[in-house]
Amino acid sequence: MNRAVRRRPALATTALALLGALSLTACTGGPAPATGKAQAADPASRPDLKPFYGQRLQWTDCATDGYECARLTVPRDYGRPGNGRTFVLPVARAAATGPARRIGSLVYNPGGPGAGGASSLEEGMDESFGAAVRARFDIVSFDPRGVGGSVPALTCEPAEAEEAEAEEPEAGVEEEPAEETSEEASDAVAPLYPRTEADRSAAASGARTAAEDCEEHSGPILRHVGTEDAARDLDVLRAALGERELTYLGWSYGTSLGTSYAEQFPRRVRAMVLDGAIDPSLDWRQRVISQSAGFRRSVDDYAEQCAEIAGDSCPGSSPQEIRSLIERLYQRAEREPLPVAEDSTYAEYGGMDATAVLDAVSMAMYTPEDQWEPLSEALREADQGDATKLGALDDEVETEEETEEGTEGPGTAEEEQEEEQEEDETPEPPGDNGDAALTAVNCLDVPHPRSLRPYWDALAPADQAAGVYGTAGVTAELTCRDWPSGERRPHKVDAEGVPPVLIVGTTGDPSTPYAEAVSLAEQFPQGMLLTYEGLGHTAYGRGGACVTAKVDAYLVKRERVRPGATC
């Protein structure tokens, strides 16, 4: 699942500039009372973590008026927090508009993985919250470890061209002929459904190169950017904000972060909303098929309902005409990239290949009310021979891609080698490292096969379930084959003692299908499901007054949502 995007409507486009910490401090809250499993797992009681749990955030004005910024220091490795290696994470907040009735802080994650929370807040994301919530809470967010303004941050910039050196196969991993590529195969563009050995060789070669680039440029931190560690950072942030319990809202990937927090710190949760849910019990193949089928359904919805939302701009007079046009563009782009203007982002690649076209169409499914009209115009022009507008759709949205073997344990030779590397070996990341963070977190969180065969075996079922959206999704997962993986495994939620958690599911969600919200609500003890009958990705902030009222009542008053609640 590598193509999830979250875009909040009507946000100001302001550059994030975090200033040095100064002035105001927040008191550190003590840990909430806990028993049993939560008591045993309480990290705040560990002496080597007290320096992190005891820190006070020093707030100063952000570059954008109306917001305050600070920095939070967390250990790079929670297993060895005293080794001096850390992440320093940007934090931002918008103060409660009704300070006399303030409840506390509400921390949110905007999605991803790879989206910077601090920057999203400065861009106005607090306006996505209802007035009742903004009045009673400071709205707070942070850049997760390795993301955005995090220091250090991930980067996977392509390596300098070098003489390829023969690689010895890893112990216990079979060397497969499909990966031994010729120069011709390496230079080829993998189609949406790689059927031939040459196509599959090209796909495997490109994926390995991508993994090697990340290892070269971000090797020392690749094993430390997973969701479980980010959830522990969230608890350090809770303490630094002076909160005994966490009030949290996560969109999209933020639901994975929230779920992990609830599992590790169930008795520290005050209230939690998970909107656009990701089911942690699905393995990599199930995740690909679930999300890809969601995109396919959404594109069908676009064809069926285009006239209602995009009006006269629709690129066909009937659903079948629209479907045929999109399919025609995919087929053309597989033969030869679609032409673009010289100033297009895709000009240096000779135009838009089939994967780029599919990504542009898929991303437009997130907010139909904003994106279906420009998509329609772009498709019409692309069919007439100019894909410039189609390629520019990426520039109009904030991309935060979502979704998500062999585990390296402590003390391995690989880990020891990492310890010997210096801090300054991780280079300064590019301005937007969302793609690198997306790959790093997804691959680390979800175990992937080391052999190529399971990926090729998954192509036919993915094609049957979701067409080219499924086969392209499987191919995108190949990068994780050569990636370090963490200790997480697909599992049902284990969060005994957590208070009622509210899961919000959108029936027409392309990226986090509604069925996953239903499943997650069933897995949580006392889980509550709010159904939004509509199109697009997530609901709170874009699903209307009904969704806002129910979510706000839960966050402010902890008012429960009744079974079967629908907006």
Image: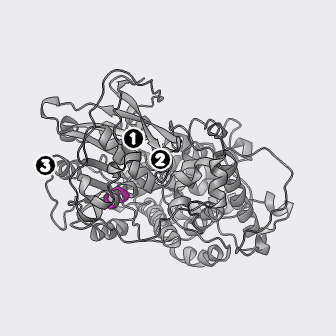
225 and 385: which one is in front?
225
Residue 108, quarter of the rendered image? top left
Q: Earlier in the sequence, mark 3 or mark 2?
A: 2
Disc with the residue nearer the chain's start (1 vs 2): 1
Q: Is residue 367 visible?
A: no
User: What secondary structure characterizes most of the magenta part?
Assistant: helix
For marks 3 and 1 on the same chain, the one whose residue lies earlier in the sequence: 1
- In the rendered structure, which segment of residues is drawn in magenta? 259-263
Q: CA distance from mark 3 to mark 1?
A: 31 Å
Q: CB of mark 1 within 8 Å of CB of mark 2?
A: yes
Q: Residues within 10 Å of mark 2 (few under 14, many from 20)?
A: some
**Crowdedness of circle 1 by 10 Å Cα count: few (<14), some, many (20+)?**
many
- Mark-to-mark CA distance, 1 and 2: 9 Å
Q: Residue at x 50, y 61 (%)?
A: 445
The type of residue carrying mark 2 is: Pro
The residue wearing badge 1 is 52
Helix or strand or loop: what does disc 3 sit on? helix
